Amino acid sequence: RSLRMNIVYGHSRSSVFAAKAIVYFIAATLLQGIYPLISTIQATVSFGWGAPVTAGTIVYILRAAILWMLLNVGTISFFVLAAFLCRDIVLTIGMSVGGIVIFMLLAPVLKTVPVLGTIIAASPLAQMDRIAQPLMGVGTLCTLLLTAAVTTLILLTAAYSFFRKAEIK
């Protein structure tokens, strides 16, 4: 209903789409990041850091957090696509969670197929373990950034295509 009202009041579909996608990215990133952040803070307060905190440690934590957020945007783009495909909250949640679970279950099997293996290896979910590397070269950093950008671009283009052609009731 809110989509229809925004369009009736003169907002273009592209501005409505961009606003919805940005809010979805921010909300999903916050929701996915709160639990690890709180548990990390709680464990640090309870058990201590274990070593003196250095500037290198802080830079490592910030780098890992920023890369996690960027790769997470690529993953959340799948949720945005699901939201614009389904247009129903329960179905969107089911498709988003189910899609990620199915991907995680089928990825090891599908990696054996040459073309699919390359696509899966380039997905944001497959790249998540690389952000924890203590030393990261420029090539790895570029791969992570490119993965996030390309995945986001492809999935948001598909989502916008569906939204542009959808009949708003």
Image (tube, rainbow, N blue to C red):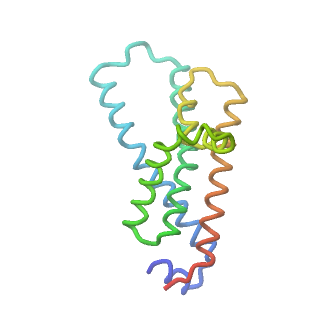
Q: Position of residue 105 (x, y in %)?
A: 46, 43
- Residue 120 vs residue 86: left or right? right
Residue 60 position, x and y percent, is 55, 25
Residues 49 and 166: in front is: 166
Residue at the (62%, 20%) spot, across then down: 135
**Quarter of the figure with residue 22:** bottom right
- Quarter location, residue 51: top left
Q: Dividing the image into 4 quarters, which one contains the N terminus?
A: bottom left
Q: Measuring 33% from the left and 34% from the top, which residue is drawn there?
A: 39
Q: Is residue 67 above or below residue 154?
A: above
Image quarter for residue 112?
top right
43 lies above or below 81: above
Eyeballing the image, is 168 above or below 32?
below
Residue at position x 45%, y 78% from top? Answer: 2
Front residue (pair 34, 107): 107
Going by the picture, which residue comes out furthest to the left? Answer: 46
Q: Looking at this rendering, what residue extends furthest in the top direction?
A: 51
Q: Position of residue 81 (x, y in %)?
A: 55, 62
Q: Is residue 13 left or right of residue 96?
A: right
What count of labels does the image hold?
0
Could you say where residue 14 lies in the image, as x and y percent from the top left? 63, 72
Residue drawn at point x = 58 percent, y = 36 percent: 127
